[in-house]
Amino acid sequence: MSKCAALRGTWQPLLWLALLLAATLGLSELDGLFRLIEPNSRTVIYGRAAFIDLLASHLLLVALAAGAASLVGVGAAIAVTRPWGEDFLPLVNQVASIGQTIPPVAVLALAVPTLGFGNGPTLFALMLYGLLPILRNSLAGLRGIDPAVIEAARGMGMAPLQVLWQVELPLALNVILAGIRTSVTISIATAAIGSTIGASTLGDPVISGLVTGNTAFILQGAILIGLLAVAVDSLFEQLQRRAPGNVNA
């Protein structure tokens, strides 16, 4: 990678984060612009909650769900790639696949009676829905390591845990990060649905706009969700470039 390309890649996440912050703080000042879209609406700027508060709540939900899904997904992949856990591989794949086949709205509806309204069901749905990409990529990364490398590490006297932490996980890290990146991007968009059951997310203006027929509200939520997704994806791209398993790092 050339110096120019590396510098451009370093600045891209900062640019998208700056645009996200500018939009979060500046949308409320664009009353005139949004009134062109909704000239007959009494209110064109969503005001039930500050955009910065919705962004923080949205990010927290996605981060918690991604953290939980990463722990479960990577942990399960490690377990089934050990000799004592290989028999459980089909079961683990099937359980993770269920989370992708059930629509998030259905998961929310099923979780509400048990977890109540708000963040709980949303967090559960995001974790379940984001588990499969992390598990699949973790399996691909760990199983794609050259067995000769692992044998060489064992031949040097490394214990199984040392081989895992010092050899396998660093070599598989780039592929694992790709799975987490996909999962987080999906969760950023999916988290907006949580607003239908009382969770505080960037989906609030979108849902409110759909209910009231206010296109300006919908556009404000969509802009912030889109910028957040691109900014986070750009950050993960940088992490992947710096990961030990990336030949282009």
Image (tube, helix red, strand yellow):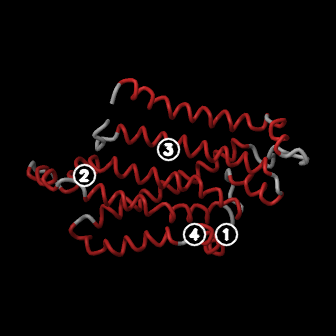
Q: Would you name the residue on which mark 4 appears?
A: 103
- Report if the CB atoms under discs 2 and 1 are less than 8 Å apart: no
- The furthest residue to the top: 3
Q: Sequence-wise, which precedes: disc 1 or disc 4?
A: 4
- Report if the CB atoms under discs 4 and 2 are less than 8 Å apart: no
- Report if the CB atoms under discs 3 and 4 are less than 8 Å apart: no
Q: Would you name the residue on which mark 1 appears?
A: 116
**Dot 1 amino acid type:** Gly
In whole angstroms, how far apart are the C-alphas of marks 3 and 1?
Answer: 31 Å
In whole angstroms, how far apart are the C-alphas of marks 1 and 4?
Answer: 19 Å
**Dot 2 amino acid type:** Glu
Front-lying residue, 12 or 119: 12
Q: Would you name the residue on which mark 3 appears?
A: 233
Q: Sequence-wise, which precedes: disc 3 or disc 1?
A: 1
In the rendered image, the quadrant that contains the N terminus is top left
- The furthest residue to the left: 155
Looking at the image, is mark 2 or mark 1 nearer the viewer? 2
Picture residue at 36% right of the left edge, 75% below the top: 91
Percent x, y of residue 247: 28, 40
Q: What is the total number of numbered labels drawn onto the structure image?
A: 4
Q: Would you name the residue on which mark 2 appears?
A: 168
In whole angstroms, how far apart are the C-alphas of marks 3 and 2?
Answer: 25 Å
Front-lying residue, 10 or 125: 10
**Dot 4 amino acid type:** Pro
Where disc 2 sits, the SS reads helix
Q: Sequence-wise, which precedes: disc 3 or disc 2?
A: 2
Q: Sequence-wise, which precedes: disc 3 or disc 4?
A: 4
Q: Quadrant of residue 134?
A: bottom left
